[in-house]
C-alpha cells in the first residue's frame, strides 16, 4: 500500500472557499478593472480588506506603488467597491504555498492575455499550462 497525501497543488487549487467573512482572511486575490476587465493578481499575508485598502490608498494618492492603481490612473478608469473589484482566488496563510498559488493565478491571467501584473516576472511553466488545460475541458 502506497502512502498518499491530499497536500497537492491540484487539491490546493480546487479547495472550497470559506463561508465566513472572506475579506478577513489572507491568500491570493484578483482585482478586476471595472472599465476594461483587465486583472491584477496579488497575494497578501494580511487580510484581503487591508490589502484592498492599500490599493485604494495608492489610487487616491496618485501613487504608483500598486500596479492596479497605476493602471486605473493611467487609463482614467474608476475604482469600485471591494465586492465589485476583488475576487478571492485562494485562501492561504503566508508560506511558500502562497507564492506558488500566486504564480499559478498570474500565469492563468497571462495565458488569457488579461493581466496587469509585471510581464518580466512571468515565466513559461508547463505544469501550470497542464493544469489550465485540464480546467478548460
Image (cartoon, rainbow, N blue to C red):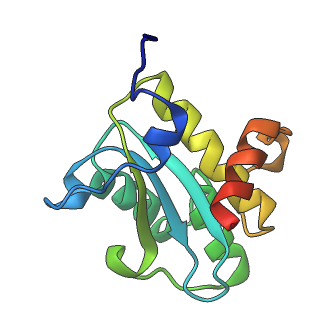
Q: Identify the residue at image location x=67%, y=69%.
A: 71
Residue at figure coordinates x 17%, y 61% from the top left: 19
Q: Between 44 and 113, which is closer to the camera in this rendering? A: 113
Q: Is residue 124 above or below residue 79?
A: above
When asked about the image quadrant of residue 92, the answer is top left
- Give the residue at the far left of this rendering: 20
**In the picture provided, is 28 more to the left or to the right than 18?**
right
Q: Residue 97 appears at what percent x and percent y?
A: 48, 28
Q: From where the camera sits, is residue 117 visible?
A: no
Taking the spot 29% from the left edge, 57% from the top edge, the residue there is: 17
Q: In screen coordinates, is 50 left or right of 2?
A: left
Tell me the quarter of the image containing the C terminus. bottom right
Q: Residue furthest front?
A: 1
Coordinates of residue 32 in the picture (x, y in percent): 55, 73
Q: Position of residue 106 (x, y in %)?
A: 66, 51
- Image quarter in which the N terminus is found: top left
- Residue 118 located left or right of residue 16: right
User: Closer to the camera, 37 or 124?
Assistant: 124
Where 14 falls versus 37 (above or below)? above
With 132 as the anchor, is 87 left or right in this view? left
Amino acid at each position: 500500500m502506497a502512502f498518499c497525501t491530499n497536500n497537492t497543488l491540484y487539491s490546493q487549487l480546487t479547495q472550497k472557499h470559506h463561508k465566513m467573512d472572506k475579506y478577513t482572511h489572507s491568500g491570493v486575490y484578483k482585482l478586476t478593472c471595472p472599465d476594461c476587465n483587465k486583472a491584477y493578481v496579488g497575494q497578501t499575508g494580511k487580510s484581503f480588506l487591508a490589502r484592498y485598502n492599500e490599493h485604494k490608498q495608492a489610487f487616491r494618492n496618485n501613487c504608483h506603488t500598486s500596479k492596479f492603481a497605476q493602471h486605473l490612473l493611467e487609463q482614467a478608469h474608476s475604482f469600485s467597491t471591494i465586492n465589485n473589484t476583488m475576487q478571492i482566488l485562494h485562501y492561504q496563510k503566508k508560506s511558500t504555498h502562497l507564492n506558488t498559488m500566486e504564480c499559478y493565478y498570474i500565469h492563468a491571467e497571462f495565458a488569457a492575455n488579461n493581466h496587469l501584473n509585471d510581464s518580466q516576472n512571468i515565466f513559461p511553466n508547463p505544469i501550470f499550462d497542464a493544469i489550465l488545460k485540464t480546467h478548460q475541458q
